[in-house]
Amino acid sequence: MPEHPFQKDFQGFMAASHAPEGWKKKVSPIITPIHEFSATEIKALREREEVSQTVFALYMNVSKDSVNQWEQGLKKPAGPTLKLLSLIKQKGLSAIA
């Protein structure tokens, strides 16, 4: 797996910190890459959860129009929304309820 962009920053911080050596060796960030969902994937995910665009939007704390635009490929979700979609994909909609 390629190194996450923040990995070097974290390693530099750990090297410069005054934490005990044993602690430095045990602590490592677990940063998983965020999946970029396609319009088809978003629609399939919502349909798998058997909810309308309106209900899906309420869970995601976005507008129904946003969900509609994602599913049509007019716009793409970003940031925290991608993380929520990843959680839903892995654990289901109940994971963010």
Image (spheres, rainbow, N blue to C red):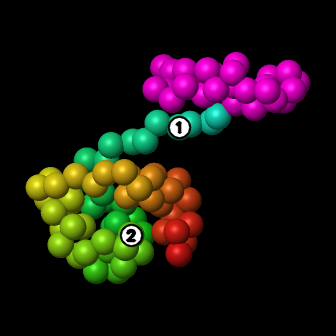
> Which residue type carries mark 1?
Thr
Q: Is residue 11 magenta?
A: yes
Q: Quadrant of residue 65?
A: bottom left
Residue named by callout 1: 32
Q: Position of residue 12 (x, y in %)?
A: 61, 21
In the depicted structure, whether residue 45 falls above or below residue 59: above
Q: Which residue is mark 2?
A: 60
The residue lying at 56 percent from left, 66 percent from top is 95
Can you see residue 52? no
Disc 2/disc 1 C-alpha distance (Å):
20 Å
Badge 1, how many Cα within 10 Å: few under 14, some, many 20+? Answer: few
Q: Is residue 55 visible?
A: yes
Image side of residue 85 versus residue 37, left or right? right
Expressed as whole percent of the image width and height from the top left, the position of residue 70 reads 21, 59
Residue type of the residue flagged with mark 2: Met
- Magenta stretch encompasses residue 56: no
The magenta-colored residue range is 1-28
Q: Residue at x 20, y 60 (%)?
A: 71
Residue 53 lies, in percent from the top left, at 27, 75
Who is closer to the viewer here, 12 or 55?
Answer: 12
Residue at left offset 16%, top offset 55%? 75
Seen in the picture, residue 37 relative to 9 is either above or below; the reply is below
Q: Is residue 17 above or below residue 30?
A: above
